[in-house]
Image (cartoon, rainbow, N blue to C red):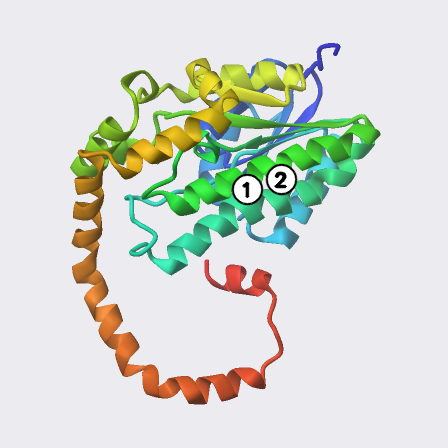
Amino acid sequence: MAKYSLSNKTVLITGAAGGIGAAGARALHARGANLVLVGRNASSVADLARELGEERVLSLGVDVTDRSALQNAVACTVERFGALDVVFANAGVAPDLPATIATVDPELFERIIAVNLLGVWRTVRAALPQIIANRGHILVTSSIYAYVNGAVNAPYAASKAAIEQFTRALRVELAMHGATAGVLYPGWVESAMSRPAFGGDALTTRMREVAFPRPLAVAISPEAVARRVARGIERRAASITVPHRWHPVGILRGIVNPVSDRLLTRHTRLQPLLRALENSARDGAAGDRAGAAAGHELCGAQRELDARKPLAGLEREYRGGR
């Protein structure tokens, strides 16, 4: 496939306020692209726009869980630059600290799914008419957690596995229009998100050291990821794995995963750490259990009340839970 030149192309980047998003913006801008920087923190994306020069950059404060705001962002993009050619759906969140499925805050779990999965869906859906019309490209940030075991990080891993499948389907569906889509699989990246695993929290750091082989447990810079992102978009790559040492693990996941899962369930150093993590969360959950017990008497009345309600869509639940 011929190189897809980014010169004078317009690229919309979500999660552009920092990390991979901001580094990717700098790399794509250097290749001549017009940029639309989208982030929840409007002042942060505005600062980046000023750094790059606002002649070719538009910044918008948008929450990717808000469908109408994303549609408006696409409309503003077309109004400013005339077209939208590339989407880098990069916005994502993760828990500050690890938690087991038994102890994770339910609202946090659902917020992560809302941003990482539904946020990608809403971003892509809003941009699709432009991407199809301009035979453009969509790059979605997944993670190595799309295929490695997500113990103590289940909501993040589940969301990243889901958007991998979403983007694989999207690539096939876009082919008839001459447009393309690809998945980005970053490993550990130097960022606020990964800081607890690299000295920010003793237990999290120890779990990373125990669960991941040393060559795979090293964090790389956002700039290293951004360079691969720019080259991958120019190649319309179906997948980009950074660092490359993770590539064989992804390719051989059908063999590696059953073996690694078996080892992790029997790991004599990891299992005690998991127990310590879960036990430390039990004290905080004790009050929740007491409240639940006190509320049992209300269950019958609640069922009667619920029977009178129409079914509500998930969108309202997620948007109301921000």
Q: Position of residue 252 (x, y in %)?
A: 49, 22
Q: Quadrant of residue 176?
A: top right
* Residue at 53% over, 48% down: 63
What residue does disc 2 label? Answer: 166
Vertical position of residue 17 compared to residue 246: above or below: below
Going by the numbered disc 2, the residue's amino acid type is: Phe
Say the numbered circle drawn on residue 299.
none
Element class at badge 1 = helix
* Residue at 37% over, 86% down: 298
What residue does disc 1 label? Answer: 162
Vertical position of residue 8 compared to residue 277: above or below: above
Q: Position of residue 268 (x, y in %)?
A: 18, 34
Q: Position of residue 304 (x, y in %)?
A: 51, 88
Label 1 packing within 10 angstroms: few (<14), some (14-19), many (20+): some
In this orientation, which residue lies closer to the viewer: 37 or 148?
A: 148
Q: Is residue 19 visible?
A: no
Q: Are marks 1 and 2 in contact (CB under 8 Å)?
A: yes
Going by the numbered disc 1, the residue's amino acid type is: Ala
Element class at badge 2 = helix
